[in-house]
Amino acid sequence: MADQNPMLGALGLCRKAGKLVMGFDAVAESVMKGKAVLVLTAQDVSPRTARKTREFCEGILDVQSMPLTQEQLCAVTHKPVGVYAVTDENLARLCEKHLSGLPHTEKEE
């Protein structure tokens, strides 16, 4: 499935390289320690989780919503996860490149 969707492929590369942080608490810690370069949320993350993610990233990093559900992301993560951080600049740019080519179903506010 990761081969069919470039965003899943990019996240798979991040995971294999050990540069993908998964889960709300782990991502929050990565942001606070200055390790996160890009923060992403799944399309179907709860409104509360999306708000809390934006709050802990405020003034540090923007949070980008992926047009992929937690179920679709299981192809990479092997479990439902709604919040991610990429800790490598080059891999973050790769993910952003694929995000810009994908339609977003909802806009972060």
Image (cartoon, helix red, strand yellow):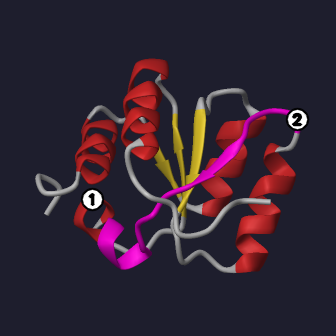
| Image quadrant assignment for residue 50 | bottom right
Name the one closer to the observer, 28 or 62: 62
Q: Quadrant of the N terminus?
A: bottom left
Q: Report if residue 62 lies within the magenta region.
A: yes
What's the residue at 56%, 61% (across, down)?
23
Label ID, residue 103: none
Q: Position of residue 24 (x, y in %)?
A: 64, 61
Up-down: is 22 above or below 32?
below
Question: Residue at 78% of width from left, 77% of height from top?
Answer: 48
As helix, strand or loop, the secondary structure at mark 2 comes to loop
User: How many marks can you see?
Assistant: 2
Q: Which x, y percent locates residue 54? A: 79, 54
Q: Position of residue 15 (x, y in %)?
A: 32, 43
Q: Which quarter of the figure has residue 106? A: bottom right
Q: Is residue 1 left or right of residue 41?
A: left
State which mark lies toward you, 1 or 2: 2
Q: Which residue is mark 1?
A: 76
Circle 2 sits on which residue?
Answer: 59
The residue segment tinted magenta is 59-73
Amino acid type shown at disc 2: Gly
Q: Residue at x 49, y 58 (%)?
A: 66
Q: Hey, what amino acid is under mark 1? A: Val
Location of residue 88 in the rendering, given as x and y in whole percent from the top left corner: 47, 24
Q: Disc 1 and disc 2: Cα gap in Å? A: 29 Å
Q: Nearer the viewer, residue 66 or 28?
A: 66
Q: Residue at x 17, y 56 (%)?
A: 2
Judge the density around disc 2: few (<14), some (14-19), many (≥20) Cα neighbours within 10 Å: few
Circle 1 — which element? helix
